Amino acid sequence: FDGIKNLIVGVTPPIIIFEQHLFSLRSDNIQLFKSLLIKNRDIIHGAFALTEDGKRVIFRYTLQLHNLDQNEFDAAINSLSLLLSEYHEQLIQFSKQ
């Protein structure tokens, strides 16, 4: 999958969590946060999030583990791949701020 590197897949029953580090924050930037929240509205599955320390922006996708099939698993990765292909230029700009 293009652009996906070091994807973390964690299992914490009853969910499976996919996390992809996108970029580290250089400073608090209200406009950047606002832009990410607005983009979250367009993302059907998954969302931008901050790590617990608030220093990195990640894409996070969660699924119920019960009855998880291969199509759902693949859809999670495809969602991230699609986001990166459509939004990569903006993410690169954000990473420089």
Image (spheres, grey):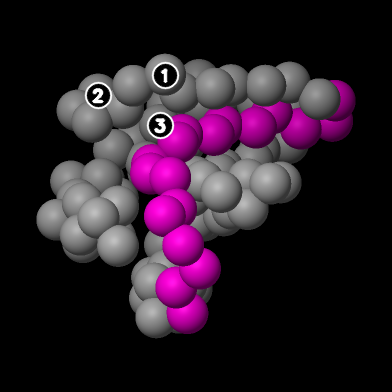
Ranked by sequence position, the earlier of labels 3 and 1 is 1
Within 10 angstroms of label 3, few (less than 14), some, or many (20 or more) residues? some
- Which of the two marks, 1 or 2, is nearer to us in this view? 1
Residue 86: x %, y % from top left: 18, 55
**Three-letter amino acid code at disc 1?**
Asn
Decide which of 44, 30 is in the foreground and name it.
30
Q: Which residue is mark 3?
A: 77
* SS for dot 3: helix
What is the spatial separation of the Cα atoms under label 2 and label 3, in whole angstroms?
A: 8 Å
Amino acid tagged 2? Phe
- Farthest right residue? 13
Residues rendered magenta in the picture:
13-30
Residue at 63% x, 53% y is 54
Under circle 1, the secondary element is loop
Identify which amino acid the numbered label 3 is placed on: Ile
Return the x and y of residue 72 as percentages of the image width and height.
Answer: 52, 32
Label 2 belongs to which residue? 1
- Mark 2 or mark 3: name the one nearer the start of the chain: 2
Disc 3 from disc 1: Cα separation: 12 Å
